[in-house]
Image (cartoon, rainbow, N blue to C red):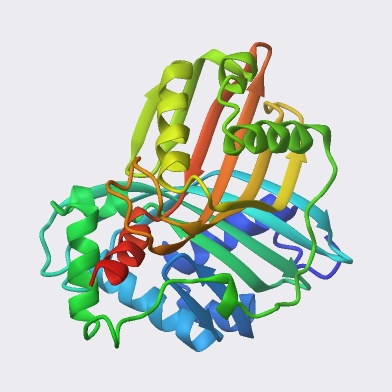
Amino acid sequence: MKGFSENFSNFPDYILGITKEIWEDRGIGTLHAYYSNDIIVRSPGSLVIGNANVIGATMATLAEFPDRRLLGEDVIWSGTPEEGMLSSHRILSTATHLGDGVYGKATGKVIKYRIVADCHAINNQINDEWLIRDQGAIVRQMGWDPYQYALKQIEDEGGPAECVKPFHPSIDKVGPYTGRGNNNAWGEKYSEILTKIMSANFNVIPKKYDRAITGYYPGGKELVSTDGVDAFWIGLRSSFPSAKFEIHHQIGRDDPQMSPRAALRWSLTGKHDGWGTFGQPTGADVHVMGISHAEFGPWGLRREYTLFDETVIWKQIALKKG
């Protein structure tokens, strides 16, 4: 781990360690060291530049959810310490809504949801990030419908003209990380599967997925077997049938004591021009930022984790509808 603190034995240990130190151990000030001053953080809902903004958002989240835990399920990574490394860090988070904040007055509700953060690190510091939270799961557990929450968010932010605009490639900033991952066979395999699905070749699902597949999807959904996987992907793709699908980053790994895994960061960019998960077509311009993790077994793809922010998709649709 050249350039990194000797406190960490390897890159996953670094990612898991600093996450716990920042959030659960209340070392928010360590962000001054662990994050670069000009870090770029892209999430479906916004583009944030600068460590000061990251620190402010972190404190606000902990004020609202003071007992929040971030349980690292996996770190799928690529790169070298000398050239920089990219981690796709999947987290299961638990928290109690004990403070007033962006989700309204404190409700005391206990919630559970996933996050995936793609972070670029070099010299013991993160300087580029892509972050997706399962906002659909959060707001549902708070008692909201994701579309109604999007409407409330627009209103709270000052209305359609003043509200924070969702992330779109047209407003992106080029950061220090421009890599595409690695060429490991498991990443290639998953990329081929997802590309076929997005090309409407849904027959790849019963061919390449384990019949006992479990899929973990936005809204906290847990779907079983290939019919559940089919329902999820066709519901998404049929909402945006003409949208352009792109894979922006691809990692495959085959590590000791673990299943072969893959991580893909991808997007759909185009019109809401079809019936599907997002209801009646509106013609809204929509950008879907997605990250998917896959675990493979002897009978095919056996676990799939996919995240995108439903509330941000509904926000883009709502802004079109007026």
Residue at horizontal 75 percent and vertical 39 percent from the top: 252
Q: How far across and down, in percent of the image, does residue 7 sit?
A: 70, 62
Nearest to the observer: residue 33 or residue 200:
200
Q: How far across and down, in percent of the image, does residue 240 sit?
A: 46, 48
Nearest to the observer: residue 166 or residue 113:
166
Count the numbered circles shown.
0
Q: Quadrant of residue 24?
A: bottom left
Horizontally, is 84 left or right of 218 in the view?
A: right
Q: Is 172 drawn above or below residue 264 in the view shown?
A: below
Horizontally, is 291 left or right of 4 in the view?
A: left
Horizontally, is 267 left or right of 92 in the view?
A: right
Q: How far across and down, in percent of the image, does residue 167 sit?
A: 48, 71
Residue 97 in view in this figure:
no
Nearest to the observer: residue 87 or residue 282:
282
| Quarter in which the N terminus is drawn | bottom right
Nearest to the observer: residue 56 or residue 104:
104
Residue at horizontal 50 percent and vertical 81 percent from the top: 29
Residue at horizontal 36 percent and vertical 77 percent from the top: 59
Residue 41 in view in this figure:
yes
Residue at horizontal 23 percent and vertical 72 percent from the top: 322
Horizontally, is 54 left or right of 80 in the view?
A: left
Q: Is 322 drawn above or below residue 317 in the view shown?
A: below
Q: Quadrant of residue 102?
A: bottom left
Q: How far across and down, in percent of the image, does residue 45 sit?
A: 41, 69
Q: Is 172 drawn above or below residue 24 in the view shown?
A: below
